[in-house]
């Protein structure tokens, strides 16, 4: 361990003597993902010039990179206190607001940034994702699905059926936090859909989100979302097949599909290999 | 554990980690059916990218970093484990995202991509970053 400590000790590089040097080295460390070292160099820059705007902005970015929201907001606000139209600070603060779920503040900040600098692609992209969130609510569904008929596969842990805006339609098993899960899922899917569109890949249809416990298989058509939590070790083709079956059954329950209900589990998939790209994802 | 860590520390100290992140992106890009890859910090800063020229890197970086943070913060709010990898599939391709110590690894692939292979490669890349970037005594379990 002493050898490791010696290897990982900050190098004997001399401390920067000027603000530009400190900031240049900080930017370099940032490009390498060495946030702690970059932060130390920004601190050095602020020792040399405590009102340096670039240093405060860089400090804010580094706080965001290290998921420290409160100090990041303070630094972005400091920059805006000295330059109310600073587009980068406006965008940075907007992203923090988005992360905190304050879409209205985020939108205001992005609009302010784009007002002065209309060519900021990241601001335009985020604003586009926010507009997607504000899509008008879909017409009420004729009936809620009978979730007891949407049978989970044997290893299924949870099923959530919701609108794309996050409104919960049905959950199995019924859980206190099903509404919150549904809303969180909707937010993530809207951002993912916006990213896919920006990449020119088309509308989002399927997703798999893995954590250390579960693999959540999702199917959506932009209006409806069906998500199925299965054990993490589930094979992707099997999980996608399972959520496909539940998707078809949900559409039938909601009166949105003419196909016969593939409710019984296991069942023959409704779609064919030719029209179902899931099968190619394996 | 100290063997590989020691080697990585020796290799990647002294500002060679810039090259190291580019190597990680290149390795991901080399996978079958993969169109491009990037590493983006949580603030949307692009650390390294090799994406098709048709992709607007800054816009996609802003959105994927926001998406990564959304997946992390919503899991925290709900008291659930944070996501490790996520895959989003569309008509014309698939996007993978994985969280790491320095930011999010993003892979764009064709529809035909092998999900398991790409997730495995992302897991390896995350482990490599963890080994090379974590300070001593602060290595997250794989």
Image: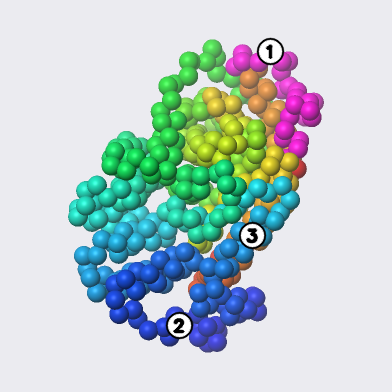
Question: What's the residue at 31%, 59% (across, down)?
Answer: A57
Q: Crowding at label 3, few (<14), some or many (≥20) Cα neighbours within 10 Å?
A: some
Q: Chain of mark 2?
A: A
Task: Confirm whether residue B75 shows in the render.
Answer: no
Above or below A160: residue B12: below
Name the mark nearer the viewer: 3 or 1: 3
Q: Which residue is mark 2?
A: A11
Q: Which residue is mark 3?
A: B26
- Image disc number at residue A70: none
Q: Chain of mark 3?
A: B
Q: Which residue is mark 1?
A: A258
Of B91 and A116, which appears nearest the observer?
A116
Above or below A246: residue B83: below
The answer to whether the residues at label 3 and label 1 have Cβ atoms under 8 Å apart is no
Above or below A243: residue B45: below
Asked if both marks, 3 and 1, belong to the same chain, the answer given is: no
Residue A259 lies, in percent from the top left, at 71, 15
Magenta region: A253-281
Q: CA distance from mark 3 to mark 1?
A: 47 Å
Asked if both marks, 3 and 2, belong to the same chain, the answer given is: no
């Amino acid at each position: 361990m002493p050898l490791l400590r010696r290897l990982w000790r900050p190098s004997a590089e001399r401390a920067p003597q000027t603000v530009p040097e400190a900031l240049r080295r900080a930017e370099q460390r940032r490009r390498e993902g060495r946030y702690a070292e970059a932060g130390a160099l920004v601190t050095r820059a602020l020792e040399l010039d405590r009102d340096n705007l670039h240093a405060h902005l860089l400090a804010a970015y580094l706080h965001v990179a290290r998921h420290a929201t409160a100090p990041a907001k303070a630094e972005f606000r400091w920059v805006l206190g000295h330059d109310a139209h600073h587009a980068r600070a406006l965008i940075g603060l907007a992203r923090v607001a988005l992360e905190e779920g304050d879409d209205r503040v985020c939108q205001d900040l992005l609009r302010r940034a784009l007002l002065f600098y209309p060519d900021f692609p990241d601001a335009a992209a985020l604003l586009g994702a926010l507009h997607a969130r504000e899509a008008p609510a879909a017409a009420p569904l004729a009936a809620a699905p009978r979730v007891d008929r949407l049978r989970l596969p044997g290893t299924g842990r949870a099923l959530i059926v919701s609108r794309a805006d996050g409104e919960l339609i049905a959950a199995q098993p019924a859980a206190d936090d099903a509404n919150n899960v549904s809303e969180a899922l909707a937010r993530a899917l809207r951002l993912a859909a916006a990213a896919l569109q920006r990449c020119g890949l088309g509308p989002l249809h399927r997703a798999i989100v893995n954590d250390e416990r579960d693999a959540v298989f999702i199917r959506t058509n932009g209006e409806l979302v069906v998500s199925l939590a299965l054990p993490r070790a589930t094979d992707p083709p099997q999980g996608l097949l399972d959520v496909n079956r539940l998707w078809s059954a949900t559409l039938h329950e909601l009166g949105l599909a003419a196909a016969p209900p593939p409710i019984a589990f296991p069942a023959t998939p409704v779609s064919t290999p030719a029209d179902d790209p899931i099968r190619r994802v394996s | 554990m100290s063997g590989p860590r020691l080697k990585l520390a020796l290799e990647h100290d002294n500002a060679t980690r810039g090259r190291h992140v580019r190597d990680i992106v290149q390795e991901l890009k080399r996978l079958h059916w993969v169109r491009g890859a990037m590493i983006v910090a949580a603030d949307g800063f692009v650390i390294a990218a090799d994406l098709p020229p048709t992709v607007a890197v800054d816009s996609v970086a802003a959105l994927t970093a926001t998406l990564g943070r959304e997946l992390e913060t919503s899991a925290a709010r709900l008291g659930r484990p944070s996501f490790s990898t996520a895959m989003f599939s569309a008509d014309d391709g698939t996007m993978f995202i994985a969280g790491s110590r320095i930011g999010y690894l993003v892979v764009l692939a064709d529809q035909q991509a092998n999900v398991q292979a790409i997730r495995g490669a992302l897991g390896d890349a995350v482990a490599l970053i963890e080994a090379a970037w974590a300070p001593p005594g602060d290595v997250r379990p794989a």
